[in-house]
Image: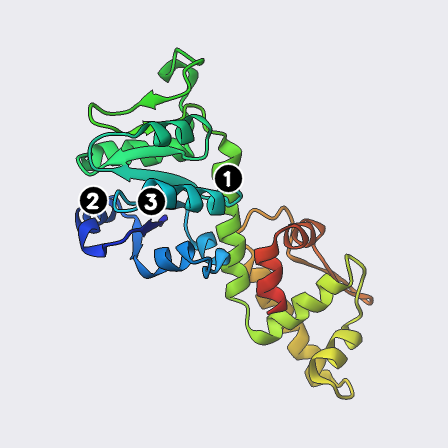
């Protein structure tokens, strides 16, 4: 299920769009408080990693939209502006500059919303968009405008980030500590005895080693739904454990992932 965040000044004004999105099986979180936190620079930027789409309500003025777009421009999330009826010149500029990815209206039907959100994650084929030079594509008679050929990499990145973040958040305290130890080793092998000593801070025994083995197995299982090419942790018999190099690289390059593990 895809998650949608609606930022608004009035959550009661979003009931119609919320019902339409829920009819399409989107999980919708609507918040005025989080919008206020964003406006006051009190937001937790990691919170956006839980969502694939963020909708900026028509109750938010243009200057506030500008601030939010600045905040969101480096996030792997599709930014959608919702308007009452007419698109402002500023919103059009943001759309052309790829700072917004789509514009929708309150009048858009469930069908129109479905096609808009689908095309954000499934770029239009060439035969669907013969004029490849066009910067924008009108998807409905009302508003529903998107940028054509939105890079698939972004959609993939958003979904992949969510999968990895979900796996990290589901780690127990002990599992997180083990993963953290392997991360700190930077791809080097860490002996089972070393990990046990760091986890339990006492002389290593068979019970510790057995518990470590089962815990590592659980960690591997929690990353199975991600797109890692190999297991999250490599077992080298007689030597110890080593973190998957791809997972190591992802966590090191993503501050949100690093914060979850270190936290």
180 vs 29, nearest the viewer = 29
Real-space Cα separation, disc 1 to disc 3, in angstroms: 19 Å
Above or below, 71 against 11 in this view is above
Q: Nearer the viewer, mark 2 or mark 1?
A: 2
In the image as oriented, which residue stretches furthest toward the front? 63
Under circle 2, the secondary element is helix
Compute the Cα span from label 3 to label 2.
Answer: 13 Å
Return the residue at label 1: 156
Distance of label 2 from label 1 (alpha carbons): 25 Å
In the depicted structure, whether residue 128 falls above or below residue 194: above
Name the residue nearer the viewer: 132 or 227.
132
Badge 1, how many Cα within 10 Å: few under 14, some, many 20+?
some
In the figure, is residue 236 to the left or right of 95? Answer: right
Which of the two discs, 3 and 2, labels the residue nearer the N terminus?
2
Q: Which residue is mark 3?
A: 55
Residue 103 position, x and y percent, is 31, 33
What number is the disc on residue 20?
2
| Residue drawn where x is 47% and y is 45% of the image | 72
Residue nearer the viewer, 70 or 168: 70
Mark toward the start of the polypeptide (1 vs 3): 3
Q: Is residue 232 above or below residue 193?
A: above
Q: Is residue 83 left or right of residue 67?
A: left
Relative depth, front residue between 31 and 213: 31
* SS of the residue under disc 3: strand
Quadrant of the rendered image containing residue 91: top left
Residue 113 is situated, as x and y percent measured from the top left of the image, at 26, 36
Identity of the residue furthest to the bottom in this view? 202
């Amino acid at each position: 299920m895809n998650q949608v965040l609606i930022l608004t000044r009035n959550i009661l004004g979003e009931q119609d769009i919320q019902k339409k999105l829920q009819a399409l099986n989107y999980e919708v979180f609507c918040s005025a408080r989080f919008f206020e936190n964003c406006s006051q620079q009190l937001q937790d930027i990691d919170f956006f990693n839980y969502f694939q789409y963020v909708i900026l309500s028509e109750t938010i003025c243009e200057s506030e939209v500008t601030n939010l777009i600045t905040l969101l421009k480096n996030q792997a999330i599709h930014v959608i502006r919702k308007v009452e009826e007419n698109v402002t010149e500023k919103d059009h500029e943001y759309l052309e500059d790829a700072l917004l990815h789509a514009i929708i209206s309150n009048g858009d039907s469930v069908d129109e919303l479905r096609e808009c959100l689908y095309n954000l994650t499934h770029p239009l084929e060439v035969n669907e968009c013969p004029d490849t030079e066009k910067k924008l594509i009108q998807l409905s008679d009302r508003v529903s405008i998107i940028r054509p050929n939105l890079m698939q990499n972004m959609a993939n990145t958003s979904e992949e980030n969510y999968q990895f973040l979900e796996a990290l958040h589901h780690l127990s305290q002990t599992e997180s500590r083990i993963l953290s130890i392997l991360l700190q080793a930077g791809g080097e092998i860490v002996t089972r005895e070393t990990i046990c000593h760091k986890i339990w801070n006492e002389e290593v025994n068979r019970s510790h080693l057995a518990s470590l083995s089962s815990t590592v197995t659980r960690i591997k299982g929690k990353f199975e739904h991600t797109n890692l090419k190999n297991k999250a942790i490599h077992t080298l018999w007689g030597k110890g454990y080593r973190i998957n190099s791809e997972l190591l690289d992802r966590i090191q390059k993503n501050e949100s992932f690093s914060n979850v593990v270190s936290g």
